[in-house]
Image (cartoon, helix red, strand yellow):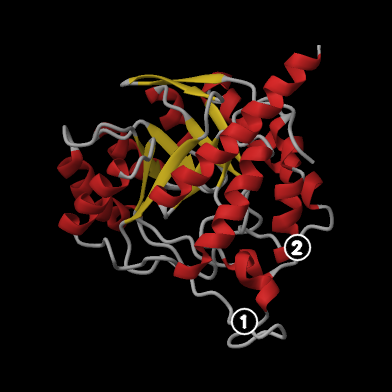
């Protein structure tokens, strides 16, 4: 199911207005952690993290998403103090060096507060305001955009099931709950972005169903972000470790770039405004081609009228 075209939105950031919908925005991932599933430990050092942030910008990212806590399946979580210890030095080191806006990937109000004070301009809450009752107030007070993601359970429990019987009903209901909580706290509707939470408490099949039915999420009336990059469901059809019944090896995390490319394309054709990725340079190319498909489809409809 393909969307007929993307509605345009405008986000108000401290650095200016960001338009969503004219083209897909690329959010580059920077994990300042020792244990993230895809690149844990690679950018844990401040100098390495700053170098990687500048590389992400140079590769063509529109937003940098910095996270100090792994939310991989089974992760236990860390204290707010530890999370701040990881991200604050990186944020401080990037002041006046990074031209693209920074998003802080956190579930904790205290971390968001510190990060926003250190230059971050967007909050990315994977819990959809469920984890910390103070998060909505922080975002409202700073008047920043907030990304509300759907998650079933917590990172520690999310892949242990039971999974939702009707994934679309579950995700839409969960996102509406998050939106209502945000609005009650005073967050402007125009500052809310929705993320269906692909890979977070969903079965492999449900992740693909979410991609196929993404226009149903788009119809809620908010900008939509997807994060499929390098996730485990991209290797599910290859079976377990080693050879599959087709003789091909199950792709490693780094080799999931091709599956990521396919799901980024599907996301854009389904109406996503932002895609969150690790392999920025490659996904910029994928997004530009997919954007042209969307644009051509829109132009073709206009010519028939």
Q: Is residue 292 left or right of residue 101?
A: right
For the residues carrying marks 2 and 1, which lies nearer the camera in this image?
1
Instruction: Find residue 35 and report its horizontal and vertical position in percent.
Output: 38, 69
SS type, badge 2: helix
Q: Nearer the viewer, residue 124 or 113?
A: 124
Q: Nearer the viewer, residue 95 or 76?
A: 95
Q: Quadrant of residue 248?
A: bottom right
Q: Is residue 188 visible?
A: no
Q: Is residue 10 visible?
A: yes
Q: Give the residue drawn at x 56%, y 32%.
A: 193
Q: Is residue 77 left or right of residue 51?
A: right
Assess disc 2: are there few (<14), some (14-19) or many (≥20) residues with their C-alpha within 10 Å of its C-alpha: few
Q: Give the residue drawn at x 61%, y 71%.
A: 235
The C terminus is located in which quarter?
A: top right
Q: List the residue tagged with mark 1.
A: 248
- Image disc number at residue 37: none
Q: List the residue tagged with mark 2.
A: 205
Q: Nearer the viewer, residue 78 or 299?
A: 299
N-term mark: 2 or 1: 2
Against 101, residue 305 (above or below) is above
Instruction: Find residue 227 and report its horizontal and vertical position in percent.
Output: 55, 50
The N terminus is located in which quarter?
A: top right
SS type, badge 1: loop
Q: Nearer the viewer, residue 293 or 18?
A: 293
The Cα atoms of the two marked residues, 2 and 1, are separated by 21 Å
């Amino acid at each position: 199911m393909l969307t007929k075209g993307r509605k345009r939105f405008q986000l108000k950031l401290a650095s200016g207005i960001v338009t969503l919908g004219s083209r897909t925005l690329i959010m580059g991932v920077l994990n300042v952690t020792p244990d993230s599933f895809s690149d844990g430990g690679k950018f844990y050092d401040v100098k390495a993290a700053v170098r990687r942030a500048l590389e992400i910008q140079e590769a063509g990212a529109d937003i940098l998403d910095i996270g100090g806590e792994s939310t991989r399946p089974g992760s236990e979580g860390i204290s707010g103090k530890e999370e701040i210890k990881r991200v604050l030095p990186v944020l401080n080191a990037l002041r006046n060096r990074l031209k693209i806006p920074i998003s802080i990937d956190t579930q904790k109000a205290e971390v968001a507060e510190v990060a926003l004070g250190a230059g971050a301009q967007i909050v990315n809450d994977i819990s959809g305001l469920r984890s910390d009752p103070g998060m909505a107030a922080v975002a409202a007070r700073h008047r920043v955009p907030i990304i509300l993601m759907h998650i079933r359970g917590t990172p520690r429990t999310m892949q242990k099931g039971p999974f939702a019987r009707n994934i679309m009903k579950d995700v839409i209901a969960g996102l509406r709950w998050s939106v209502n909580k945000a609005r009650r706290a005073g967050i402007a509707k125009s500052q809310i972005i929705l993320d269906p939470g692909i890979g977070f408490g969903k079965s492999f099949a449900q992740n693909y169903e979410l991609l196929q039915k993404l226009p149903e999420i788009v119809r809620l009336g908010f900008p939509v972000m997807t994060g499929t990059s390098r996730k485990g469901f991209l290797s599910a059809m290859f079976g377990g470790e080693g050879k599959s019944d087709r003789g091909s090896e199950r792709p490693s995390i780094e080799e999931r770039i091709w599956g990521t490319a396919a799901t980024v394309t599907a996301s854009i054709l389904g109406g996503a405004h932002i895609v969150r990725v690790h392999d920025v340079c490659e996904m910029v190319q994928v997004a530009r081609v997919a954007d042209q498909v969307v644009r051509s489809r829109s132009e073709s409809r206009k010519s028939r009228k």
